[in-house]
Image (spheres, helix red, strand yellow):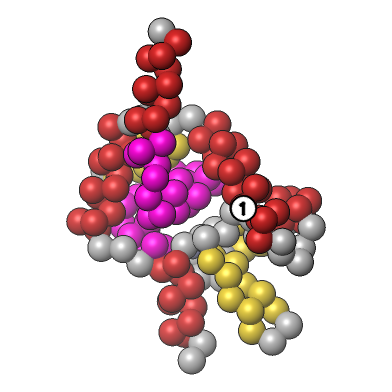
Amino acid sequence: MYKQVFKLHAQLLRALANPKRLEIMQLLRSGSLRVGDMSRMLGLEQANLSQHLMVLRQLRVVATERKGKEIYYRLAHKNFIKAADMMRQILFERLGGKATQAERMVSVVTDPVCGMHVTPASAAASLTQGSKTYYFCGTGCKKDFSNLNK
Ligand SMILES: [Zn+2]
């Protein structure tokens, strides 16, 4: 049993060891989303996204639920976000950003493209224009924002 858990843990981390899949986890932190929404937010082809979702689903990182005709993806356990936040906290500290840790974790901002609520710590991407910094749920929204503001 003891060794079995290390094997399962390693298997889970292998499934998560991909920047896009980590980004998908961040997207799902505040609720469930349809594949189409995620595809746009991430700037990722649906076929490609579906492959990532399949891996995450196999390891039960994400689960699906049907609402009417639509399939929604959500995190299978809230602790996946806790675990990711703890790892990210280490990275943020190493990167030594200007904002304090508390500010990054607590303050909530709105993604100007899709309206999703994100914290600067959880945001997948940011963009500073003049004195204002915008935060985005995913790199797809950042790209859309950059294109709109050219
Ligand atoms: Zn967004």
Q: Is residue 94 above or below residue 86?
A: below
Give the residue type that dot 1 points to. Answer: Leu
Residue 55 located left or right of residue 106: left
The residue lying at 30 percent from left, 44 percent from top is: 53
Label total for image: 1
The residue lying at 47 percent from left, 62 percent from top is: 138
To which residue does mark 1 refer? 91
| Residue 18 magenta | yes
The percent coordinates of residue 150 (x first, y second) are: 48, 91
State whether residue 115 appears in this view. Answer: no
The percent coordinates of residue 76 (x first, y second) are: 43, 31
Magenta segment main secondary structure = helix
Q: In this view, does 126 lie above or below 147?
A: above
Q: Quadrant of the N terminus?
A: top left
Residue 122 located left or right of residue 61: right
* Some atom of ligand 1 lies within 8 Å of the CB belonging to the residue at label 1: no
What is the residue that sits farthest to the bottom in this orientation?
A: 150
Residue 69, by quadrant, is top left
The percent coordinates of residue 8 (x first, y second) are: 37, 23
Residue 94, by quadrant, is bottom right
User: 102 or 148: nearer the eye?
Assistant: 102
Element at label 1: helix
Q: Where are the magenta residues, as a range?
A: 13-42
